[in-house]
Image (cartoon, rainbow, N blue to C red):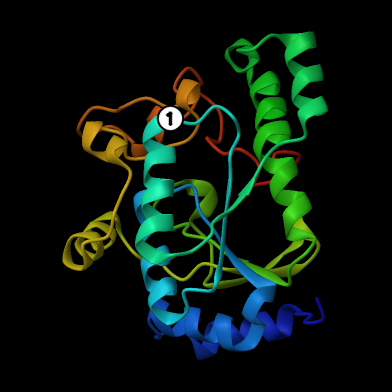
Amino acid sequence: MNVKFDSNAIKELNKKFSNKTPEEILEWCIKELGQDIALATSFQAQGMVLIDMLMKIDNNARIFTVDTGRLNQETYDVLDEVRSKYNNKIEVLFPDRKQVEDMVRENGMNLFYKGVENRLMCCQIRKTNPLNNFLKSVDGWITSIRRDQTTTRAEAQKFELDTLHGGILKVNPIVDWTEDMVWDYINKNKVPYNKLHDMGYPSIGCEPCTKAVKEGEDPRSGRWWWESDSAKECGIHFDHSK
């Protein structure tokens, strides 16, 4: 790790790449940062787009995911499909065993249904902590977030200074894409995808915390579906303490 970014550099990158394609952004990432930048994915549709783009540029580029221990089988299936199709050894991160054991012993296996505070603790231990530890080892990371997903992401930029993770570079190549654009790319390029999407899951997280939604409903309404007044974020992209 030896590349540092500041607000001026971020401003210049957003200006330079304002009209560039996601592929051009990914090419810059690999050229400038190489193995010191990694693509984060939970194998949702938009993430599959970036995996396909990145592998066409450099199939040795780093891809990582967090296995919370509560994922759907369909998510594991597409993970293996990606490994096979692109010949990339996905880096799978796991939560700290003792933290999980202590949490479950004190609060139960399904603590997240008992209030937002408990749910955020579960997300923190199972997902956010492993991510935070990993990001200490890189200069930047690539995400598949889009502005149209949630109000908390509406102001996201293609390049950001990630103050949540030590001021490293955060790159969002398809931040200005729509869901239709995502599926158009998947269909045209025959990209594998999580079959839960065919079952009415527009957004996919942990199995007990995600359900299918009806046509016309908010795509994020299936995430933490028992909560009515939360930000529908786990803490990876949004600071709940603010």
Q: Is residue 13 above or below residue 47?
A: below
| Image location of residue 239, percent across then percent down | 70, 45
Q: Residue at x 22, y 67 (%)?
A: 189
Would residue 8 be visible to someone looking at this image?
yes
Residue 173 or residue 71, whichever sits in front: 71
Q: Residue at x 80, y 75 (%)?
A: 1
Tag 1: amino acid: Asn
| Image location of residue 152, percent across then percent down | 54, 48
Q: Secondary structure at mark 1?
A: loop
Name the image quarter holding residue 29.
bottom right
Q: Which residue is mark 1?
A: 72
Q: Residue at x 31, y 34 (%)?
A: 201
Q: Residue at x 65, y 39 (%)?
A: 127
| Image location of residue 225, percent across then percent down | 44, 22
| Image location of residue 6, percent across then percent down | 76, 79
Indicate the quadrant containing the C terminus: top left, top right, bottom left or bottom right.
top right
Would residue 12 be visible to someone looking at this image?
no
Name the image quarter holding residue 174.
bottom left
Q: Is residue 44 above or below residue 177?
A: above
Residue 157 or residue 132, whichever sits in front: 132
Q: Is residue 121 above or below residue 175?
A: above
Residue 51 or residue 110, whichever sits in front: 51
Neighbours of disc 1 within 10 Å: few (<14), some (14-19), many (20+)? some
In the picture, measured across the screen, residue 6 lies left or right of residue 169, that is right
In the picture, measured across the screen, residue 40 lies left or right of residue 81, that is right
Name the image quarter holding residue 191.
bottom left
